[in-house]
Amino acid sequence: MSSDLDLLAGFESELAGLAHPAAAVPPDAPSFNLDDFDRYLLFTSGGKDSAACLLHMLELGVPRSKIELHHHRTDGYEGSSLMDWPCTDSFVKEMARAFGLPLFFSWKQFGIEGELLRENCGTAPIVFTRGDGTLVTMGGERSKPNTRRKFPQMSANLNVRWCSGVSKIDVASRMLINDPRFTEGKTLVITGERAEESSNRARYAVFEPDRADNRHGRKPRWIDHWRPVHKWTEKQVWAIMKKYQLAAHPAYFVGLSRASCRHCIFLGSNAWATMREIDPDGFARIAAYEVEFGVTIHRTRSVVEQADRGTSYAPDPFWAKVAMSKEYTLPIFMDPWILPKGALAENCGGPT
């Protein structure tokens, strides 16, 4: 493989040579003035859709000097390792380094596992890094005592599927509302939801004020939200990644169609069979929690029953090791580029 620096140089040369950048991408160019914003915040899980957002933004001429990557740590940063892929933190760091972009982390203290185990107590604070580098811990002290003691359930209702709200949506809003730099100028938040993923996501607006926007308030905070690949197909997402030889998250090479949590509640039977094969200890912890709580993730079947019904994707041991490693040491740009095993495959379980 060539070095990241060599491939990035070629990548920038190709972008600079585009006479009309939008002509190289799907025809749904922004309906707003993309030059109106002072900063562009891309929330990334490390997955293909947020990667496609980044490449699309660069093709449209958004300067890298104004782009920031933001990643929510779904396991927090206090020791939990229940949900996320071990490689994800390192992978998004390498992505930011390869593109020369600043990377910010935010999380719910103790992550999804901490919220999962909550019993007659308030919710934990959130943590994020402000633009000036200050690490901020806030919230939780006013929350009413409550008990979870069960996994999020497979539902479009975020009160039931609480993992997304607790570990991502609420964390993002708190950060945007409480970092003073977002009261200066205009901010564009970018996320990678696509209509093809579900009927619920198909109803999302492509462009709208963000939920943290307060442009008409006493202390104005202008924040818009853009979903640039909302109308794209999965084939278009993989096509732009192939065009720029951008490596995919290792989860796709394991065989999964999404790079969400490795123990995502939406996993199907084949994916659970794969998790049992490559991560037996983590799988056993999930199964034990289901027994302890007396409530399964699936409405009628335990993860053991699901895995028994499924067939493992039989991932290449090399990619299983990469995905389960805490350090991602492969290049971010692949030469030759490889379409992952999980691309355009069965849906291993997805969002609603």
Image (spheres, rainbow, N blue to C red):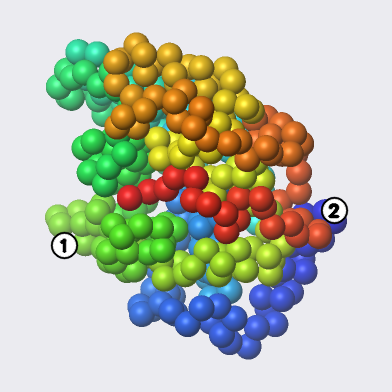
Q: Residue at x 44, y 19 (%)?
A: 287
Q: Residue 146's x, y, as percent?
A: 18, 19
Give the residue furthest to the right: 2
Point 77% across, 66% down: residue: 9
Query: To which quarter of the image does residue 116 belong?
Result: top left
Instruction: Give x and y (percent) for residue 180.
Output: 33, 47
Measured from the top left, where is residue 194 in percent x and y?
41, 62
**Of the two numbered discs 1 and 2 in the rendering, the one whose residue sits closer to the viewer:** 2
In the image, farthest residue toward the bottom: 19
**Local crowd at mark 2 within 10 Å, few (<14), some, or many (≥20)?**
few
User: Where is residue 214 drawn, in percent x and y?
Assistant: 21, 57
Using the rendered view, name the quadrant where residue 190 is placed. Answer: bottom left
Residue in view at x 75 percent, y 34 percent: 317
Three-letter code for the amino acid on which mark 1 is drawn: His
Q: How many marks?
A: 2
Q: Is residue 260 above or below residue 5?
A: above
Residue 194 left/right relative to 280: left
Could you tell me which residue is drawn at 49 percent across and 32 percent down? 309
Q: Decide if residue 214 is on the left or right side of residue 104.
A: left
In the image, residue 293 sits, relative to residue 209, either above or below, namely: above
Q: Amino acid at mark 2?
A: Met
Does residue 36 appear in the picture of this structure? yes
Q: Residues within 10 Å of mark 1 (few under 14, many from 20)?
A: few
The residue beneath circle 1 is: 216
Closer to the camera, 138 or 123?
Answer: 123
The answer to whether 107 appears left or right of 209 in the picture is right
Say which quarter of the image contains residue 128: top left
Which secondary structure, mark 2? Answer: loop
Give the vertical position of 170 relative to 193 (above or below). Answer: above
The residue that disc 2 covers is: 1
